[in-house]
């Protein structure tokens, strides 16, 4: 199947069956997420994989999204609360190591990041980091669909509870969006049979001559 067919196949699953996704498939999705583009390449967010049923039950308590606990795995995308000089310096060292260049050769790039990012408020940088995490969410949706794994992107969760229960706060992270993964319960999920609703392409995309 091609990408368009896979995207037509996917839908925001409301009810999952009991089947678990394999660790090989899970790793493929994580690899795809890690390959997402991010502004400056800094990857200012992290992904947490939650499988443990009792933790997910607690996370999902009081949420309208039963998928938090009733799915195979839950991915939590968490963005850094602030961007620091240490993060930028570690990133420079990482690039230098991966590309076999002296870190000094990256001085201009480092100065651009320091100037561009550290001049902004922590709130602005957190919002920027969260946008990068949403790009990763999009990658995950596509990667899952290509593997015929169902998924639900979810903003309907208690971020403060997630941050505390998953130990994100002490890592300087805040949860921004989540993705349930698993297999649809085709019989019992009314949404599985609904026609996908999207704008006609002519209304959605404009060609500028
Ligand atoms: C960022 C984001 C947050 C969403 N939050 C929820 C949610 O909390 N619960 C839910 O059931 N669906 C959620 N959705 C799913 C959307 O409602 C769904 O993608 C949209 O209605 C289009 O339908 P489709 O994805 O099935 O094609 C979310 C989607 C996105 C992209």
Image (spheres, rainbow, N blue to C red):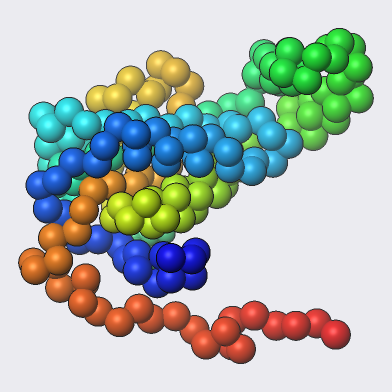
Residue 103, above or below 204: above
Please state which of residues 134 and 32 is positioned toward the viewer in this rendering.
Answer: 32
Mark yes or no: residue 63 visible.
no
The residue that appears at 87% across and 20% down in the rendered structure is 106
Q: Is residue 97 above or below residue 67?
A: above
Image coordinates for residue 121, horizontal then vertical, percent: 66, 34
Where on the picture, by quarter, is residue 55? top left
Residue 88, percent from left and from top: 71, 20
Q: Residue at x 48, y 30 (%)?
A: 46
Q: Is residue 173 left or right of residue 180?
A: right
53 relative to 200, above or below: above
- Percent x, y of residue 183: 21, 53
Residue at the outermost front position = 1
Identity of the residue drawn at 48% across and 66% down:
2
- Residue toward you, 131 or 147: 147
Is residue 179 toward the left or the right of residue 44 in the image? left
Q: Residue at x 78, y 20 (%)?
A: 99
- Left or right of 133 in this view: 209: right
**Quadrant holding the C terminus:** bottom right
Q: Quadrant of residue 86?
A: top right
**Residue 136 shows in this picture:** yes
Q: Quadrant of ligand 1?
A: bottom left
């Amino acid at each position: 199947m091609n990408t368009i067919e896979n995207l037509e196949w996917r839908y925001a699953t409301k009810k999952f069956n009991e089947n678990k996704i394999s660790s090989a498939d899970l790793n493929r999705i994580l690899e795809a997420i890690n390959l997402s583009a991010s502004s400056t390449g800094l990857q200012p967010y992290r992904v947490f994989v939650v499988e443990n049923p009792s933790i997910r039950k607690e996370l999902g308590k009081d949420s309208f999204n039963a998928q938090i606990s009733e799915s195979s795995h839950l991915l939590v995308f968490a963005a850094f609360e602030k961007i620091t000089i240490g993060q930028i310096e570690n990133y420079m060292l990482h690039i230098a190591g991966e590309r076999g260049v002296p870190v000094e050769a990256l001085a201009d790039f480092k100065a651009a990041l320091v100037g561009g990012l550290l001049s902004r408020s922590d709130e602005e940088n957190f919002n920027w980091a969260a946008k990068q995490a949403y790009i990763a969410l999009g990658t995950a949706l596509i990667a899952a669909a290509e593997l015929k794994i169902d998924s639900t992107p979810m903003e309907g969760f208690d971020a403060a509870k997630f941050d505390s229960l998953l130990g994100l706060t002490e890592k300087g992270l805040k949860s921004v969006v989540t993705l349930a993964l698993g297999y649809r319960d085709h019989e019992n999920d009314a949404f599985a049979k609904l026609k996908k609703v999207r704008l006609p392409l002519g209304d959605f995309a404009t060609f500028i001559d």
